[in-house]
Amino acid sequence: MIKDIQQEILKLKKEKNAVILAHSYQAREIIEIADETGDSYALSVAAKKYDCESFIMCGVHFMAETVKILSPDKKVYLAKKGTGCPMAEQMDKEMIMRMREKEPDRKVVAYINTTADLKTVCDVCVTSSTAVKICKAIDSEKLLFIPDKNLGAYVRQQLPDKDIMTLQGGCPVHGAVPLSALEEAKSEHPNALVLVHPECSPDIYSRADYIGSTSGIMNFAKNSDAKEFIIGTETSIAEHLQYECPDKEFYPLSKMLICPNMKLTTLMDVHKTLMDIGKENGRAFEIIMSDELISKAKVCIDEMIRLGG
Ligand code: 13P
Ligand code: SF4
């Protein structure tokens, strides 16, 4: 049954000249039919290379917005309406404008997990895989890093010469993992290497063997000679790695590391979206943004690609 739907999706996407982008936190059956998979950075730059009519993003809303900003002439659909990232909506434009007035000599660095509206008042975007490189390259010693205080603290640790200010924000999934989860996982699997996403708390990542983005963690595990790994990011990554490296063992750091928004999209949502592309009042959820919003938000995404490329 799943295989039949996957076959139909592959046929439909050819007929409709559509490209499917899937964040690595998506379910296995979606990853299998995607044209591009990866972390936030990989997806945002990969989309630019396609000469297609439309993109279907299997992920969360800010990711689809990023694709639309970089490919404004294409139609961009979010496979499941209502999949938001709570962290992306934690801060609003007015709050950051007030901070800019108080701290006029700080450049504002926005994690890509922010709304397009918020990006319009920021100087540069970063992703977890490019944050240190980009913050190092910015021509300012004073930065305000929003919204993730944990990722911001990690960048601060890596770049002690910069004055990096953070605010109270972060991922409610990664940030909620308690130190006791790490202690339990380590006592159950004493030989496993610990690989952690920097959205987790510093208490956790400071005890890790490797700290990195989703793709960083996957690449580290695939290329390592070690046989056992505790995976400190969304549980889907431990699952995907287990398929890709059947001779190794992967243990989720915590059962709580499940992003409810990333889990909402189903294979049938991708199917419905493809079926209804171009239909009036259909089920395909198109990302609509004004030209003004696109051009203002694009400034800090272009800067991310310039400094991170
Ligand atoms: P990356 O994909 O950049 O590693 O970020 C993880 C995440 O939480 C995405 O929302
Ligand atoms: Fe947002 Fe966290 Fe989910 Fe990523 S894992 S989409 S940062 S809530």
Image (spheres, rainbow, N blue to C red):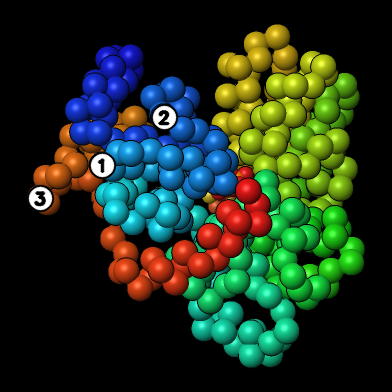
Q: Residue at x 41, y 58 (%)?
A: 69
Disc ID at residue 146: none
User: What amino acid type is highlighted by mark number 2?
Assistant: Asp
Q: Left of 203 or right of it: where is 231?
A: left
Q: Residue at x 50, y 33 (%)?
A: 37
Return the disc, 3 or 2, that comes first in the chain's sequence. Answer: 2
Mark 1 residue element: loop
Q: How many numbered callouts?
A: 3
Label 3 CA crowd tier, 10 Å (few <14, some 14–19, many 20+): few
Disc ID at residue 35: 2
Quarter occupied by the N terminus: top left
Percent of width and height locating residue 128? 66, 50
In the picture of the structure, the residue carrying the numbered disc 3 is 280
In the picture of the structure, the residue carrying the numbered disc 1 is 53
5 or 106, which lies in front?
106
User: What amino acid type is highlighted by mark number 3?
Assistant: Glu
User: What amino acid type is highlighted by mark number 1?
Assistant: Glu
Q: Quadrant of residue 21?
A: top left
Label 2 CA crowd tier, 10 Å (few <14, some 14–19, many 20+): some
Percent of width and height locating residue 146? 64, 67
Percent of width and height locating residue 22? 45, 36
As drawn, the residue found furthest toward the bottom would be 101
Spatial CA distance of label 3 from label 2 is 26 Å
